[in-house]
């Protein structure tokens, strides 16, 4: 009997740890029909595959769409310009840049963005 109590205590401890770290309940997967009209318009290119995407990717896309909506028009134009420049790179260069970006910490990413802004201002 004491062995079962110890096992139960261990299970409870692991469960409490999972709750604390956020592992117990998976995030709610927002389905396409649950998006607002505005969100569906912004994310329209993904309509056919939205419900098949991993939850984390959907959340990232929603977050980015909200950030885009909150950006001033001048900042959106700067992002579009940069994207058009990047689209001209060969696929292997874009892939290498993507991998380098994903390997950066959030602080390193912020520093890189600050550097791009400074270089852009210097070019004008």
Image (spheres, helix red, strand yellow):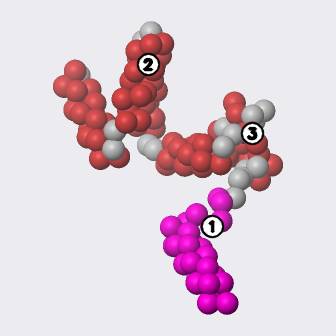
The residues bearing labels 2 and 1 have C-alpha atoms spaced at a distance of 37 Å
The picture quadrant where one finds residue 58 is top right
Q: Position of residue 97 (x, y in %)?
A: 38, 24
Which residues make up the magenta segment?
1-27
Q: Position of residue 30 (x, y in %)?
A: 72, 52
Mark 3 highlights which residue? 52
- Choose between 79 and 59: the one closer to the eye: 59
Comes first in the chain, label 2 or label 3: 3
The residues bearing labels 2 and 3 have C-alpha atoms spaced at a distance of 25 Å
Is any part of residue 112 visible from this angle? yes
Label drawn at residue 82: none
- Choose between 60 and 103: the one closer to the eye: 103
Q: Nearer the viewer, mark 3 or mark 1?
A: 1
Q: Is residue 116 magenta?
A: no
Q: Is residue 23 magenta?
A: yes
Mark 1 highlights which residue? 24
Q: Is residue 110 left or right of residue 118?
A: right
Q: Quadrant of the C terminus?
A: top left
Residues tagged 3 and 1 counted as in contact (Cβ below 8 A): no
Label drawn at residue 94: 2
- Choose between 86 and 94: the one closer to the eye: 94
Rendered position, 54 above or below 2: above
The picture quadrant where one finds residue 40 is top right
At label 2, counting other C-alpha atoms closer than 10 Å, the crowd grade (few under 14, some 14-19, many 20 or more) is some
Q: Secondary structure at mark 3?
A: helix
Q: Secondary structure at mark 1?
A: loop
Q: Residue at x 28, y 35 (%)?
A: 112
Residues tagged 2 and 1 counted as in contact (Cβ below 8 A): no
């Amino acid at each position: 009997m004491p062995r079962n109590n110890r096992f139960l205590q261990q299970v409870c401890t692991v469960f409490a740890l999972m709750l604390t770290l956020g592992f117990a309940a998976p995030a709610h997967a927002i389905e396409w029909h649950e998006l607002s009209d505005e969100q569906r318009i912004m994310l329209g290119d993904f309509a056919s595959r939205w419900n098949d995407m991993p939850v984390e990717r959907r959340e990232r896309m929603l977050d980015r769409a909200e950030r885009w909506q909150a950006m001033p028009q001048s900042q959106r134009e700067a992002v579009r310009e940069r994207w058009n420049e990047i689209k001209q790179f060969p696929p292997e260069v874009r892939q290498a840049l993507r991998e380098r970006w994903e390997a950066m910490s959030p602080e390193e990413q912020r520093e890189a963005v600050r550097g791009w802004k400074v270089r852009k201002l210097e070019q004008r």
